[in-house]
Amino acid sequence: MTDDEILAEFRAADALLEGHFILSSGLRSPRYLQCARVLMDPARAERLAKALAAKLPPDIRDRVEVVISPAMGGVIIGHEMGRALGKPAMFVERPQGIFELRRGFALTPNTKVLMVEDVVTTGLSSREAIEAVRKAGGDVIGEAALVDRSSGKTDLGIPFTPLIRIDVPTYDADALPADLAAMPAVKPGSRAAA
């Protein structure tokens, strides 16, 4: 898929929003990608996952044994990536504020894991999820995401493959441009702002 085709999928799902948004990182942005909306159509989710799986470097794709994603945002795309790669899909969640494998999910030592996210902005959630998988015995060999909105700045310490990079400015709450400051802020994601 080309970048234009990927963005067309987001637009068709009304998943590319304009306004004043509070991201899960606490940063503010004039644009928001609501991946839950783009993934609510199973056929669209399958197309995007297949495109993302095809974009993975072969040396990573060929070694993946398990796909793991952080709950909530990564669960659907993680499941679809598992299907696209023909591998089991699990997720980590934060019942006490720290990611962990639950629900009977377990890894044998050194299981080769592909971490899958919906959107990466600062990489904080990804790094926390990667650490949880490592504590559970997994070897995270790469990360894939639908969207990298970090402007290519996020270093996860492992190879990172986004389906698309979307460079949208982000601002600290106390350093907003006047036009953004004049709009009411909305928190559209699944986590409270930091």
Image (spheres, helix red, strand yellow):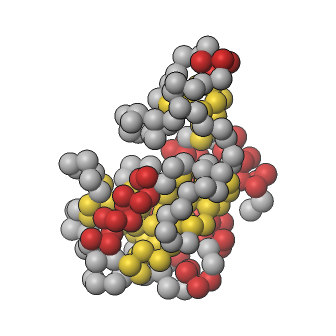
Residue 140, image quadrant: bottom left
Determine if residue 130 is in view. Answer: yes
Residue 160, image quadrant: bottom right
Q: Quadrant of the C terminus?
A: top left
Residue 13 at x, y percent in the picture: 63, 41
- 78 to the left or right of 12: left
Number of numbered discs visible in the structure rendering: 0
Residue 193 at x, y percent in the picture: 40, 34
Q: Quadrant of the N terminus?
A: bottom right
Camera-side residue: 44 or 155?
155
Q: Is residue 54 above or below residue 185?
A: below
Camera-side residue: 118 or 122?
122
Q: Residue at x 64, y 34 (%)?
A: 31
- Single out the residue that lies furthest toward the front: 175
Residue 49 at x, y percent in the picture: 58, 63
Determine if residue 76 is in view. Answer: no
Q: Is residue 23 above or below residue 180?
A: below
Q: Is residue 115 above or below residue 73?
A: below
- 132 to the left or right of 37: left
Residue 184 at x, y percent in the picture: 54, 16
Q: Residue at x 26, y 64 (%)?
A: 101
- 178 to the left or right of 188: right
